[in-house]
Image (cartoon, rainbow, N blue to C red):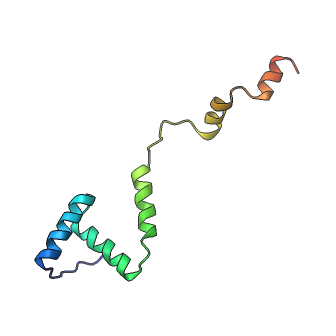
């Protein structure tokens, strides 16, 4: 990323500040987002990375897939047949 300076009108500055506050992001991030849209730049990679960062570890204590499936289905057919000696 490269630092760039620019002049803004009072109206632009006020709206930029308000939008950044509403979205909970920096004014620079708002400007970059607007430029990406206007220039047709693909920001999907950044969005994917942000999504991973925001959700990483959210299910750290959740069971893995086989364990979850067993808890959902209950005992499997092999277990039930084994109890019957078959």
Q: Quadrant of residue 73?
A: top right
Question: How far across and how far down the image is residue 78, in percent?
Answer: 80, 28
Please determine whether, in this image, residue 54 is positioned above or below residue 19.
above
Q: Quadrant of residue 19?
A: bottom left
Identify which residue is drawn at 88% across, 21% down. 86
* Residue occupying the far right of the picture: 86
Identify which residue is drawn at 79% across, 28% down. 77
Q: Nearer the viewer, residue 75 or 23?
A: 23
Identify which residue is drawn at 27% across, 69% down. 30
Question: How far across and how far down the image is residue 5, in percent?
Answer: 18, 81
Q: Nearer the viewer, residue 21 or 46?
A: 21
* Residue occupying the far top of the picture: 84
**How many numbered circles are shown?**
0
Quadrant of the rendering where the N terminus is positioned: bottom left
Question: How far across and how far down the image is residue 82, in percent?
Answer: 82, 21
Please determine whether, in this image, residue 64 is positioned above or below residue 71.
below
Question: How far across and how far down the image is residue 16, in percent?
Answer: 20, 70
Left or right side of 10 for 81:
right
Q: Quadrant of residue 13?
A: bottom left
Left or right side of 82 for 60:
left
Please determine whether, in this image, residue 84 is positioned above or below residue 60.
above
Left or right side of 48 for 71:
right
Identify which residue is drawn at 48% across, 41% down. 59
């Amino acid at each position: 990323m490269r630092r760039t300076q620019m002049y803004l009108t009072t109206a632009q500055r006020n709206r930029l500040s308000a939008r950044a506050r509403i979205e909970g992001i920096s004014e620079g991030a708002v400007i970059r987002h607007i430029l990406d849209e206007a220039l047709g730049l693909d920001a999907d990679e950044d969005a994917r990375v942000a999504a991973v960062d925001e959700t990483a570890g959210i299910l750290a204590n959740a069971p893995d897939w086989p364990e979850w499936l067993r808890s959902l289905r209950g005992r499997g057919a092999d277990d039930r047949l084994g109890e019957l000696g078959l």
